[in-house]
Image: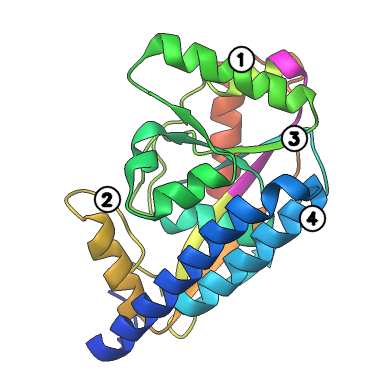
Amino acid sequence: MSGRRRSALAAGWRIVRALGHVLHGLWIIRSEFGKLTPDATDLLVREWTRQMLGILGVTLQVRGTPPAHGPLLVVANHISWLDILVMNAARPSHFVSKADVKAWPVIGALVTGVGTLYIERESRRDAMRVVHKMAEHLRGGDILAVFPEGTTGDGQTLLPFHANLIQAAIAAEAPVLPVGLSYVDPVHGQRHDAPLFIGDTTLLQSLWNTLRATDVVAVVHYGEPQRAQGRDRRTWAQDLREAVVTLREG
């Protein structure tokens, strides 16, 4: 793991603060979301998420220009449970996520509360349902975000992009925006391993590693939106993956 580490006591105090902030977030979702305009809701999500990153000790760095409005499908590489928080801190959007995230302790309730669309990746029928739902959201002018790798990676090598969800952008004739995510140690200029959530690492272990770290910088690097321009979903997915690789490498 890169960099210095906080004491267990300091990390434990951050857990207490984070839990309090999560409970406050759930209260906001239940009491405020139905009364606010979409723009006001996005602002609330962004500010709450930035405060959470501050509690976790994660610094946000945004490169490029976040999208101002939809319709837009955002595609990014996937490294950690932290990715959704980081991307919402840069520019809130509706995420498409694998269904087991819904069962994550506490975080699942938050992710569900901000309008996440869930997909059973093992079910072809469910994938088609979600693609149709995504196309409806895009036609309605929303910004959607997906992790086309389908699972978290090691922060070094991108897995192949699943092309199924790209079909929603083709059906809705919406642009797709590639985004590169990375976690770095600003002192040594190296990749930071603390937020990794792969292999046998549990959610709690990854959270604890992040809380113990003192120097995590989350980089969100926006590219330029693309349109299909006659490409089928597989070709477009490959081109988007190459764009994300370039952005992630900075």
- Quadrant for the C terminus, please: bottom right
Which residue: 79% across, 37% down?
A: 70
Give the SS element for disc 1.
helix
- Pointer 2 residue: 198
Q: Position of residue 81 (x, y in %)?
A: 40, 54
Type of the residue with mark 3: Asp
Q: N-terminal of the two: label 2 or label 1? A: 1
Q: Nearer the viewer, residue 151 or 81?
A: 81
Separation (CA) of disc 2 from disc 1:
30 Å
Tell whether 127 sits left or right of 59.
left
Could one spot residue 200 in this view of the protein? yes
Please tell me the numbered disc located at residue 40.
Answer: 4
The answer to whether marks 2 and 1 mark residues whose Cβ atoms lie closer than 8 Å is no
Q: Amino acid at mark 1?
A: His
Q: Residues within 10 Å of mark 4 (few under 14, many from 20)?
A: few
In-image side of 25 versus 168 (left or right): left
Q: Would residue 156 appear left or right of 130 to someone viewing this image? A: left
Screen quadrant of the N terminus: bottom left
Does the CB distance between marks 2 and 4 fall below 8 Å? Answer: no
**Residue at 28% across, 71% down:** 208
Q: CA distance from mark 2 to mark 4?
A: 35 Å
Task: Estimate the x, y position of residue 247 in percent, counting from the top left.
Answer: 60, 52
**Residue under label 3:** 142
Quadrant for residue 138, please give it.
Answer: top right
Q: Which residues are magenta?
A: 171-179
